[in-house]
Amino acid sequence: MVDGRTLHFHLNGINNQNFIMRDEETGSWWQQVTGRAIFGPMKGKKLTLVPMDELSFALWKREHPAGRVLRPDPTVKEYESKDWEAHIAKLPLAIHARSKRLPDREIVVGVSLDGEDKAYPMSSVIAQSPVIDTVGRTKIVLLAADDGRSIRAFERGNVELFRNGDKLFDASGTEWDFGGKSAAGAQLRPVPLLKDYWFDWENYHPKTVVYARH
Amino acid sequence: MRWFTLFLLTLITLAVLAAPVFILHPFKEETLRGLTVAYALKRWGLLIDLLAIAAAIAVAMRLWSGRWWRKAALSFAVIVMIAASALARFNHFEKMFRPLPQPKYAAAPEAAFVDADDMVMTVAHGAEAAAYPIRQLAYHHIVQDVVGGLSLVVTY
């Protein structure tokens, strides 16, 4: 929805392996990763990024037992296979990352706060969770769920989380969960994450910092 | 000279068709200039095609005489142009990845088509929560939905 108008989008093309969509109403072209209109009457306008998560189905179902799930379209004969990410990784690239800080196809979660962009390799977050860090002036924590594949980030204020076994605690010994909620009822504010390939993240965030454990 | 004009007009409609397909190729680097050309050709392509076809018909009528093969060649040029113009209106990306104009949903406990360890993209707003399995999104790329009153385009 832009300027009070609901737009309807179609897949329209590709720009360095990030796709372009076209809206039916004005014919403008929009870049997927930024949500920004790059050509047409809407040029310069931006779609609002809605808070979202990328989770394993089991985890989501536990949190939202009354939720609804998109059904497969019966006219599509074959959806992507379970290991489709491995196939994608073998496709040729149109562009390469400018810096060689990470491999092109490394999967990162990107955080943008206070004008700073930071990329966290997925594998580091999963291995080190909770990742305690600061982006811009905002203190954040990245958490990996017990499924070993879902990641969330929160503003942590002055809360210092650490792991004991597979549970999370703060300094006072209060337990926290993957939803950013404490046993005492406190709730951390979620930070939007963008899961992306390193080459694409760096292309749209050229000044990005890469997380290194400190 | 008239034959040459007809040839050029045919080339124009073929270029309007082929250039954006070539520029927006998935495994090739795109540049701002290329994208600008592709956008202009998609935006003004129909107008360019109609003008070129009208001009071609006018030229063909002037040349319409003599042996049958001459008339056949003229008709062929005009038919090629009309076909190119029709094809240029066609979105081949939506042929490769069929869109979902009427997405359907299942309640979470009944969704047997997703495995426990399959990844889903999820949105919760107001009292409503929706999940979009990545394996479906990786095909359709675009799903439009309204969650808790919020109009969304879900992309992957």
Image: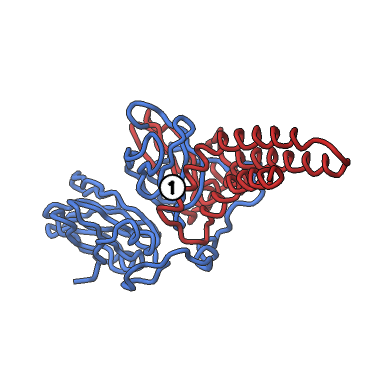
Chain colours: A blue, B red
Q: Is residue B48 above or below residue A17?
A: above
Q: Residues within 10 Å of mark 1 (few under 14, many from 20)?
A: some
- Residue at left offset 47%, top offset 42%: B40
Q: Residue B4: image x %, image y %?
A: 68, 47
* Left or right of A118, for residue B77: right
* Left or right of A120, for residue A113: left
- Residue at left offset 17%, top offset 59%: A134
Q: In this view, which residue lies farthest toward the top?
A: A4
- Residue at left offset 38%, top offset 58%: A196
* Left or right of A198, for residue A177: left
Residue on which disc 1 sits: B36
Secondary structure, mark 1, is helix
Question: Could you say which is closer to the camera, residue B113 or residue B148?
Answer: B148
Q: In this view, which residue lies farthest toward the bottom?
A: A100
Q: In this view, which residue lies farthest toward the right?
A: B67
Given the image, on which type of amino acid does mark 1 rest? Thr
Q: Is residue A209 above or below residue B80?
A: below
